[in-house]
Image (cartoon, coloured by chain):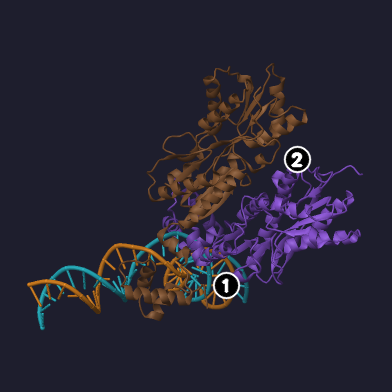
Chain colours: A brown, B purple, C cyan, D orange
Amino acid sequence: MENSKVTIHDIADILGIDSSTVSRALNNSPRVAKKTKTKILTKAKELGYRRNHLASNLRKSKTNTLGVIVPRISRYFFSSAIAGIEETAFKAGYNVIICQSLESLEREQSILDTLLANRVDGVLISISMETKNDNHLNGLKLRNIPYVFFDRHCNIEKNSNVVIDDFEAAFMAVEHLIDQKCTEIAHFSGPQNLEIYKNRFKGYKSALEKHNITFREELVISSSLMEKDAAENVKKILALPFNVDGLFCANDVVAIGAMKYLKEIGIKIPEEIATVGFSNETISSVIEPALTTINQPGSKIGVAAANLLIDKISDNTIHKTIIVQTNLIQRKSSLRTYK
Amino acid sequence: MENSKVTIHDIADILGIDSSTVSRALNNSPRVAKKTKTKILTKAKELGYRRNHLASNLRKSKTNTLGVIVPRISRYFFSSAIAGIEETAFKAGYNVIICQSLESLEREQSILDTLLANRVDGVLISISMETKNDNHLNGLKLRNIPYVFFDRHCNIEKNSNVVIDDFEAAFMAVEHLIDQKCTEIAHFSGPQNLEIYKNRFKGYKSALEKHNITFREELVISSSLMEKDAAENVKKILALPFNVDGLFCANDVVAIGAMKYLKEIGIKIPEEIATVGFSNETISSVIEPALTTINQPGSKIGVAAANLLIDKISDNTIHKTIIVQTNLIQRKSSLRTYK
DNA sequence: TATTAAAATACAATCGATTGTATTTATATT
DNA sequence: AATATAAATACAATCGATTGTATTTTAATA
């Protein structure tokens, strides 16, 4: 007969011992004799006892809850990161509150308020496109609540991050285009306040330099990287007096938007414009031609971020940046027969 | 100077009144004089007071937390449902714990244990493919913890559900294929223990009957509806002595898998086989030809389910089934020039 | 056996907010 | 002004688990 209302006092009363001993036994404290422990554990099981986390947490002033803030839960990368976070957190006895900023700084701030009100033990955050710094994390800093950035981070010292090497990944992607004999490569970049897009841009530029390809400012277009931006960006590029034959996009969504528009106006991919994206969304393997892209291991990043945060909860003086390996997935959108 | 350690006692001490009055003031009780209320509220704001939910919930024995169980968070339908749930729950002052069963009954059971241990106030669940009934919800029933099924439900009386009309949607989809002059329509169905797949099948059959098209058992294939099942299913269908010219799939994932394979072996879509899916995943508008499918409004379903659960939390005698409207999105995979 | 150290258990305060009951203060009525 | 009534506030127990300190029991040593 499982009854949720069984408390340590009930067990104590039945066994004629003190509730503090019961508590210690249930926490496997060495201060309780083995014989008593088994007696208590048996009775607890028999009565269907379940620890009341509210009471326990109140006493310990811990909530065993982590807050997670992502721009959008429906993006495949974030949903797999969340899956990794949940998995790790649960194993360590933490619950997770998931919130989406929808790319709005204002929402991000109000979410942080909510998380504070809920006294989370730590926060995992991937910042919105509008976010320029970590000022709005002041509440966390003041209360010494640890936080870890993952993927979209702030370039600020003494922060902890789990990220990929955006520079290297972009470098790899662009070098691949060059390898496919592209000579005029355009780049669709994201908001330049975000480190990841800055670094992807730097990687792009650096790859061009290495291979002695002229870098042209006009071929770099920053946008919010939504599907709706794609056609506009493509038009701008095509209006230029350069014969663009390669396109490196800072995410898959804009890459796919661009491909759709290019196909619409009859430009062949990859023959006329070889295209590479970033993130490996589910759609990318489905579109035709399938999109070459950088694979970001979402789940792995989630696991690493959660573990780092849990470490920081016991010792918030830890400052660490973990870099997770990415790889280039070569698909048809960029593979062309050498001319 | 915001300090998270401010309690009602601090406020009470400073103002020289009792903490119970402070508590009542903060809860806007009519038992406190207006003047005192403003005095307390002002001081609370000044000190940066934040209610400790742990203490409050312990006393009220409520957690203000909802549990959500979905098969897989990365499916677009579920992530948008979750977004709707979060939104609604937050507004009503609830937190949400999200868990994924990964289509495993065993995991679903252990998640329910975790949710019980966390004393959630209610549960929203979309059952796994392995789940056959609601026996494993016994823990919830015993403790009178309300729960609401959404999308994937159990066909059990006195349960509350937020669902779509799978029968009607399937009927609509198949009628559309018939309208496109398909005469031998195959159906890829899901596990028959799930109501939604049973109903989609019934809708399929009923549409055939209405239009005097012979129903053939061999043209119905049940599988787990994963991408890996698709090619296998298609092979079975093509091996039959019927000239299949239409395909209605119980979800988009298997539909897309089927399309990929059909294209591979040179069968033209929609000319030779017109195809319709179910759920409107993101990929479906991207694949070529774009997939005709049933649009399930995930966010709307999430909102409705959360609202219904919150209602049940105040009165668990409510038993209600809400049906959310779907619509058919016609795309190229099924639209063929009339022969 | 007496004494001491160590092991096991009991006592009691605490975490912060809530709420039924008791008491004080203010207002209204005759 | 005296009394009755209502309004405002104070008191104190409670939710269930944890934990420092005190006490009792057991084991060890002389």
Q: Is residue B41 visible?
A: no
Residue A65 x/y as whole percent? 49, 55
- Distance from disc 1 to disc 2, alpha carbons, whole Å, reads 51 Å
Residue B123 x/y as whole percent? 61, 63
* In the image, residue B234 above or below residue B116: above
Q: Quarter of the image holding residue B269?
A: top right
Q: Which mark is residue B288?
A: 2
Relative side of A101 to B225, left or right: left
Residue A31 x/y as whole percent? 30, 68
Helix, strand or loop for disc 1: loop
Which of D22 and A189 lies nearest the eye of the viewer? Answer: A189
Residue B72 x/y as whole percent? 62, 54
Which chain letter goes with mark 2?
Answer: B
Which amino acid does the dot numbered 2 rest on? Glu
Residue at horizontal 47 percent and vertical 62 percent from the top:
B55
- Neighbor class of circle 1 (other Cα within 10 Å; few <14, some 14-19, many 20+) is some
Screen quadrant of the N terminus of chain B: top left
Which amino acid does the dot numbered 1 rest on? Arg
* In the image, residue B155 above or below residue B38: below
Residue behind mark 1: B143
* In the image, residue A299 above or below residue A276: below
Q: Which mark is residue B259?
A: none
Mark closest to the chain's N terminus, 1 or 2 = 1
- Neighbor class of circle 2 (other Cα within 10 Å; few <14, some 14-19, many 20+) is many
- State which mark lies toward you, 1 or 2: 2
Which chain letter goes with mark 1?
Answer: B
Relative side of B213 to B127, left or right: right
Residue at horizontal 66 percent and vertical 51 percent from the top:
B228
Residue at horizontal 46 percent and vertical 62 percent from the top:
B19
Helix, strand or loop for disc 2: loop
Q: Do labels 1 and 2 share a chain?
A: yes
